[in-house]
Image (cartoon, rainbow, N blue to C red):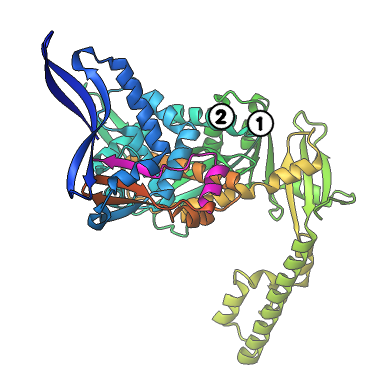
């Protein structure tokens, strides 16, 4: 379909030009291409431009909704005999994420920051492509060039360049605080997130570099020299079983429904006190109400508890049972009282210690009967194996003090249930077994909130497992590790990209009641194929199945049009 200008002579005005909307079609009888006038706009000098714009808008809307009326024109006559299938790319994953990206307000937040900047590259689209790549097929920035150009369809982005991707990463990190706050409020309002209970925990990841970054200095345009600390490659024994590699500490704030609403990152040797201080300072600027922070035993210290109680907030925190220097834990264990059984089978004992102090600490001892049985069975197996090894040593060595005796006595698993006499004889430590029995199935938590019910405190702490699942998925689903970036802002930005991918995945899982793995089985079947005919080129989607419709409806996003692009 095209516009044609025809000329005709009139007695009054001489040569006059007329504007027509025409269409070519194939005539089977004459076996020739013919032209028909679809609409006559009249004289060119008298055309109403606003009316034409309205017509164009209406036609575009009509084509989008009624593609069945358009396709026969492209495949008219014997054109199907000359149709060439040029290939297809994956559409389902990028389409779903792009619609979620817009619905969550992330695209709007980025564009609001970009409105005063005159970038010549589509930064918002570049950032989305990196986030989608993390969620669907994690790869390097160099491979992402091929992924965007040949494997998937991303609206308004036909190709990317790795250098532009790095520029987009720098922009993301530069405005991370504003963007995270904007995204937090947009998501909280859209899904009515309850942020009165936030789960805080940390994990680590490692970097494939040699050694640690030394401090370095650089000079800016004004000639001022500034010193920078080697940012996050300070070695620390992390949770990835790679103590030889440099580490970075990553922290998330997760809601009770498992949605990560904010992330942080620090060098591997950052202290827990510094981490808690920055978390509290950042979240205090987010216009929230009273919040209860739920944290694991790793953050439990007097200084951290004092920080968490600032600005009228409270904490629920895990306590260590087996370390002798924690007098409060031993006092809670030895305090008399009956256990109360909850509906879920857990048994709890609520205790208030330090009642004379200005800052009371409330302890809750929890006993899980099923876990207590598992602990006993596990210990019985360990003790039985320890006895077998002791007997084997007696038969072989005849009371001689050997290396094998020392190895068994210092064994990480069996050694704690074995004692050694003055003569060097090994035997089972029954006193140690009796002491361990009192810990079977038990764990201790404390809180500064005296108004919450015991059950609410216990259930709040048990939900800390939600953040552990976020960490597992960050490492295994979207491959946050290993990291090869060297610059500070790139390392931070890499973690932000992974957080954005995790945010969309979690919300999609919550709304669809499916895992990300189950969703991928559904949307991976949706492709975008390119067909070439004598009349033009069409980019058409594959069939949208009932499962796809059900998934898109659950996520409140539109299904893609049957025809995505037509070129005549």
Residue identified by numbered label 1: 291
**Residue drawn at point x = 60 percent, y = 43 percent:** 299
Q: Quadrant of the N terminus?
A: top left
Crowd band around label 1 with a 10 angstrom C-alpha radius: few (<14), some (14–19), many (20+): many
Whichever of labels 2 and 1 marks the residue nearer the N terminus, that label is 2
Q: Secondary structure at mark 2?
A: helix
Stretch of the chain drawn in magenta: 547-568
Q: Nearer the viewer, residue 130 or 31?
A: 31
How far is disc 2 from disc 1 in space, using C-alphas? 10 Å
Q: Secondary structure at mark 1?
A: loop
Q: Is residue 558 magenta?
A: yes
**Residue drawn at point x = 43 percent, y = 43 percent:** 560
Q: Quadrant of the C terminus?
A: top left
Residue identified by numbered label 2: 283
Q: Nearer the viewer, residue 555 or 240?
A: 555
Give the number of marks. 2
Question: Whole-percent x and y of residue 312?
Answer: 68, 25
The label shown at residue 455 is none
User: Is 83 placed left or right of 433 in the picture?
Assistant: left
Q: Is residue 486 visible?
A: no
Crowd band around label 2 with a 10 angstrom C-alpha radius: few (<14), some (14–19), many (20+): some
**Residue drawn at point x = 56 percent, y = 36 percent:** 276
Q: Is residue 477 above or below residue 497?
A: below
């Amino acid at each position: 379909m095209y516009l044609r200008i025809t000329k005709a002579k009139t007695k009054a005005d001489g040569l006059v030009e007329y504007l027509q909307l025409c269409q070519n079609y194939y005539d089977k009888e004459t076996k020739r291409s013919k032209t028909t006038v679809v609409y006559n706009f009249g004289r060119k000098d008298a055309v109403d431009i606003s009316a034409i714009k309205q017509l164009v808008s209406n036609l575009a809307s009509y084509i989008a909704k009624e593609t069945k009326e358009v396709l026969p024109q492209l495949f008219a006559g014997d054109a199907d005999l000359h149709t060439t299938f040029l290939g297809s790319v994956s559409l389902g994953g990028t389409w779903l994420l792009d619609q979620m990206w817009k619905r969550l307000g992330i695209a709007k937040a980025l564009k609001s920051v970009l409105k005063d900047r005159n970038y010549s590259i589509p930064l918002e689209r570049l950032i989305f492509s990196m986030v989608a790549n993390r969620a669907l097929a994690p790869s390097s920035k160099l491979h992402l060039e091929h992924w965007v150009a040949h494997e998937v369809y991303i609206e308004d982005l036909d190709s990317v360049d790795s250098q532009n991707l790095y520029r987009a990463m720098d922009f993301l990190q530069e405005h991370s605080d504003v963007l995270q706050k904007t995204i937090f409020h947009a998501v909280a309002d859209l899904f009515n997130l309850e942020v009165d209970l936030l789960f805080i925990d940390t994990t680590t990841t490692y970097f494939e570099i040699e050694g640690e970054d030394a401090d370095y200095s650089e000079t800016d345009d004004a000639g001022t020299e500034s010193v920078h600390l080697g940012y996050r490659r300070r070695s620390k024994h992390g949770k990835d079983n790679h103590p030889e590699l440099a580490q970075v500490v990553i922290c998330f704030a997760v809601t009770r429904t498992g949605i990560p609403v904010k992330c942080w990152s620090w060098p591997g040797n950052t202290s827990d006190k510094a981490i808690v201080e920055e978390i509290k300072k950042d979240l205090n600027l987010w216009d929230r109400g009273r919040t209860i922070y739920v944290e694991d035993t790793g953050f439990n210290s007097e200084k951290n508890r004092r920080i968490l109680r600032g600005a009228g907030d409270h904490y629920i925190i895990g306590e260590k049972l087996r370390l002798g220097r924690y007098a409060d834990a031993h006092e809670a264990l030895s305090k008399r009282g009956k256990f109360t059984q909850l509906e879920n089978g857990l048994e709890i004992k609520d205790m208030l210690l330090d009642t004379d102090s200005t800052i009371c600490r409330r302890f809750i001892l929890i006993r899980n009967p099923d876990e207590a049985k598992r602990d006993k069975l596990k210990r019985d197996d360990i003790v039985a194996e320890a006895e077998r090894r002791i007997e084997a040593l007696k038969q072989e060595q005849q009371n001689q003090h050997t290396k094998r005796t020392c190895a068994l006595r210092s064994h990480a698993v069996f050694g704690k249930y074995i004692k050694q006499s003055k003569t060097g004889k090994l035997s089972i430590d029954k006193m140690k077994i009796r002491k361990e029995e009192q810990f079977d199935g038990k764990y201790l938590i404390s809180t500064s909130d005296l108004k919450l019910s015991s059950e609410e405190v216990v259930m709040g702490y048990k939900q800390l497992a939600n953040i552990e699942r976020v960490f597992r998925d960050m490492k295994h689903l979207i491959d946050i590790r290993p990291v090869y970036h060297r610059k500070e802002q790139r390392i931070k930005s890499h973690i932000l990209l992974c957080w954005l991918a995790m945010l969309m995945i979690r919300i999609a899982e919550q709304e669809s009641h499916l895992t990300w793995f189950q969703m991928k089985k559904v949307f991976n079947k949706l492709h975008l194929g390119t067909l070439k005919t004598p009349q033009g080129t069409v980019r058409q989607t594959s069939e949208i199945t009932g499962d796809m419709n059900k998934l898109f409806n659950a996520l409140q996003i539109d299904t893609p049009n049957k025809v995505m692009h037509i070129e005549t």
